[in-house]
Image (cartoon, rainbow, N blue to C red):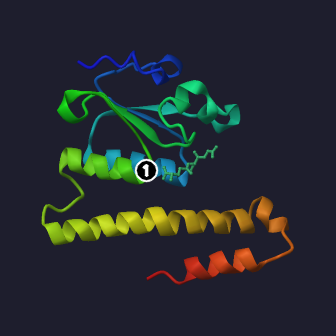
Amino acid sequence: MSDLSTFPITKRWPAKHPDRLQLYSLPTPNGVKVSIMLEEIGLPYEVHLVDFNKDDQKTPEFLSLNPNGKIPAILDPDGPGGRPLPLFESGAILHYLAEKTGKLLPADPARRYQAIQWLHFQMGGIGPMFGQVGFFHKFAGKEYEDKRPLERYVADVETPP
Ligand SMILES: N[C@@H](CCC(=O)N[C@@H](CS)C(=O)NCC(=O)O)C(=O)O
């Protein structure tokens, strides 16, 4: 079995089941993507709550796994070559899990690239654009007098392909 104790993240979030994939997350739109995938593919995992109210995502232990300080992140004790693999960015994690298990990613090359295309569309389009709409519509940005940023992002999310 892999020894995860050399990874600083396990000091703050100890692994009760070090043989299982470790997920560090919170139920936000990016966080649930990985949880949903793990449930769909049926891979055993252990989840650890990264509490934004405590700024957990900015602690040295979490930053050791994702220097960008954002969830989700994983630590797979059974990565390529049987060695532990730390990974962040939800799209990279989804792609990795699909390749690892051979699920939710077609083997046929053309269909495979189509699936990857929609994954990139979600990561580069839907995710960031909806995030901007949220900021300019619901959060601090709604106080901005200049409504052009809001209109620009609303127009983008209202005209999907
Ligand atoms: N591109 C990243 C975005 C991750 C992201 O924005 N995570 C948010 C929650 S949905 C976060 O951790 N925010 C905490 C912060 O910015 O301090 C991914 O897809 O994993």
Asked if ligand 1 lies within 8 A of label 1, the reply is: yes
Q: Residue 130's quadrant in the figure?
A: bottom right
Residue at x 29%, y 34% (from the top left corner): 44
Residue at x 66%, y 69% (from the top left corner): 133
Q: Specify whether 148 is left or right of 130.
A: right
Q: Position of residue 2 (x, y in %)?
A: 27, 20
Q: Position of residue 64 (x, y in %)?
A: 50, 29
Question: Residue 36, relative to residue 133: is it above or below?
Answer: above
Question: Residue 61, relative to residue 45: is it above or below?
Answer: above
Question: Residue 97, relative to residue 50: is it above or below?
Answer: below
For the residue pair 72 and 109, the one nearer the viewer reads as 109
Circle 1 Cα neighbour tier, 10 Å, few/some/many (<14 / 14–19 / ≥20) = many
Disc 1: which residue: 90
Residue at x 55%, y 32% (from the top left corner): 63
Secondary structure at badge 1 equals: helix
Q: Position of residue 36 (x, y in %)?
A: 39, 50
The N terminus - image quarter: top left
Q: Residue 3's quadrant in the figure?
A: top left
Q: How many marks?
A: 1
Q: Residue 104's quadrant in the figure?
A: bottom left
The C terminus - image quarter: bottom left
Residue type marked 1: Ser
